Image: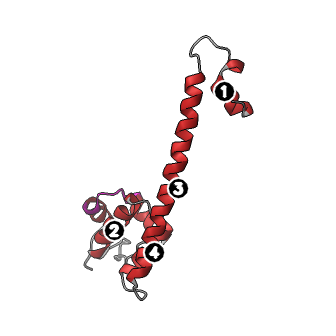
Amino acid sequence: MNGLTMSQVAKASNVNIETIRYYERRGLISEPPRTESGYRMFPQHVIQDIEFIKRAQDLGFTLEEIKNLLSASSGDEEFHSEEMHDFASGKIEEIEKKIRDLNEMKVLLEALVEKCPGSGVPKNQCPIMKQLSEGVN
């Protein structure tokens, strides 16, 4: 039986063996045939699939979104580039919202740190603890 073992795939795609098992369970990569002794024998293209998954994760796509992207890229369904454009544009909007939310959190935290006198203050007088405990500014 031709193919690559799980450790060969892991090494070639620079991921952990558990990552490959996880991708299998999530349906991102197909379960490969096994040898008579029970070893998985992956086709060569699974390395490119895993690299695709990792690059998509780096761009902020969720595993469920990546599953849809893989399906579109493998030709399992009809591909429409305008749908990909809209999908990626939506992802950009999500990222921009996260950036705004993180900046708001940063400003709030900076204000609390500014109010904090540092050491020697009892917990009930610490502005950071008061904000977290009571919601008081």
Q: Is residue 51 visible?
A: yes
Residue position for label 3: 97
Question: Which segment did they paint magenta?
Answer: 12-18
Query: Disc 4 marks which residue?
Result: 86
Q: Is residue 123 left or right of residue 47?
A: right
Mark 3 or 1, which is nearer the eye? 3
The answer to the question of whether label 2 and label 1 lie on touching residues, with beta carbons closer than 8 A, is: no
Point out residue 16 in the picture as x, y percentages from the top left corner.
Answer: 36, 56
Viewer-proximal residue, 102 or 1? 102
Image point 29% across, 69% down: which residue? 47
C-alpha span from label 2 to label 4:
19 Å
* Of callouts 2 and 4, the N-terminal one: 2
Residue 123 placement: quadrant: top right
Q: Which mark is residue 52?
A: 2
Q: What is the C-alpha distance between the residues marked 4 and 3?
A: 17 Å
Locate residue 119, reporting x and y percent: 57, 13
Which quadrant, please, contains the C terminus?
top right
The answer to whether residue 30 of the structure is visible from this angle is no
User: Which residue does the numbered mark 1 point to in the structure image?
Assistant: 129
Considering only order in the chain, which callout, 3 or 4, is on the residue closer to the N terminus?
4
Pointer 2 local density, CA inside 10 Å: few below 14, some 14–19, many at least 20: some
